[in-house]
Amino acid sequence: MEFKHEPVMLNECIEGLNIEPDGIYVDGTLGGAGHSSEIIKRLSEKGLLIGIDRDEEALDAASKRLKSYKNIKYIHGNHDDIKTLLNNLQIEKVNGILLDLGVSSYQLDERQRGFSYMGEAELDMRMDKTQGLTAKYVVNEYSQGELTKIIEQYGEEKFAKTIVSNIVKERAKKVIETTAELVEIIRKSIPISKQKDGHPAKRTFQAIRIEVNNEIKPLYNTINQCIECLESKGRLCVITFHSLEDRAVKEAFKQAEGICTCPSDLPYCVCGCKSEGKVINKKPITATKEELERNSRSKSAKLRIFEKI
C-alpha cells in the first residue's frame, strides 16, 4: 500500500520552525515525509534534515519520496532516544525539531498492522515491528486491573470495567487473536444507546495502541531531551492528539520556561529560577476550519512551540 498521509497543520509547523536554510532539522516522526518534504525544500545544500521513525515501512516510503535530496539522513529509531541518536551522528545541537505524535493514516489503513477496528487482522499495533510487545499480548496477558487502568486512562472509556470483564471471560475460553474478535467483545460491552458517538471500539483500540508503543510515559523526558538538543533560537514544534500527550508537553514547556517562586513585590529574582527558553504560543494552535473540513485527523490536534534561549 502507498504511504499516504496528509500532514496536520503543515503551514503552521513550517512557520513555527522558523527554518534557517543552512540549519540542521529533525523530523522525529518522519512517517510519509509530509512535513519533511516541506522542511527540506527550505534547506540549502549546507542544511541537513534528519528523519527518525520506528516504522521501517515509513522510512522506506519517505526515502523514495525524498530520493532527489542528498542532504537527509534516515534513522530507524525512537524519538524518545533523540539525544543518543544525534550523538551517534556526532551531532550535539540542531536548529529545529518536529514531533507529530500518534498513529499515521497509513498505519490505520494498512489493516494487517492491527491498528484499525475496521476489518479483521491479527492483534499487533506495533509501530516498530522489531519490538516484542504486541496488542495480542496486552489483551491476553495483562491482568484485569492493568487492562482496566489502561483503557480508562489512555482511552477515557466510561465502560472500561465492563469491556475488560468481558475480555477476561472470553480469553479464559480461548486466546483473543484478531481485531474483529476484540471489536465484537467491545460492541457487546457498550449499550447500543451509547454507541452513537463514533465507533464503539475507537477508545479501547487507542488505549491499547498507546500502551503497546509506550506513547505517553516517556513524553515529558523526551520533550526535555529535545530542548536540550536545540541551538540558541532553535525551535521545538510538537503536535499532540490526546489530552494526556498535550498535558505532558504543556508541563514540560512550562518547566523549561522556568517558574519563578519569588514574591511579586521583589524587584528581581532571588530564587535561582533558570529558563531554557520561551513558549511561543501560550495557547495551543489548532487546525483551521478549512483543514478540519478536509482532514479529519486534524480534529483533536494541538500544536505547541518552544524556542531555546
Image (cartoon, rainbow, N blue to C red):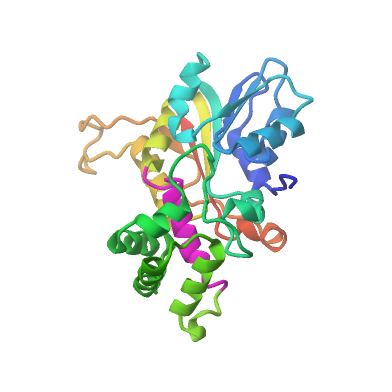
296 to 43, vertically: above or below:
below
Q: Residue at x 47, y 28 (%)?
A: 82
Q: Position of residue 77 (x, y in %)?
A: 52, 31
Q: Position of residue 49 (x, y in %)?
A: 63, 25
Q: Position of residue 305 (x, y in %)?
A: 51, 41
Q: Residue at x 59, y 58 (%)?
A: 121
Can residue 138 be spotted in the picture? Answer: yes
**Residue 91 lies within the magenta run:** no
Residue most toward the right?
Answer: 68
Task: Residue 60: name its quadrant.
Answer: top right
Say which of 227 and 18 sits in front. Answer: 227
Can residue 309 be spotted in the picture? Answer: no
207 to 54, vertically: above or below:
below
**Residue 205 lies within the magenta run:** yes
User: In this image, 101 relative to 278: left or right?
Assistant: right
User: In this image, 63 relative to 87: left or right?
Assistant: right
Residue most toward the front?
Answer: 173
Q: Position of residue 290 (x, y in %)?
A: 71, 59
Query: The C terminus is located in which quarter?
Result: top left
Say which of 148 and 129 sits in front. Answer: 129
Task: Residue 84: name its quadrant.
Answer: top left
User: In this image, 170 relative to 263: left or right?
Assistant: right
Q: Which residues are magenta?
A: 198-217
Say which of 77 and 308 sits in front. Answer: 77
288 to 74, vertically: above or below:
below
Q: Residue at x 52, y 56 (%)?
A: 123
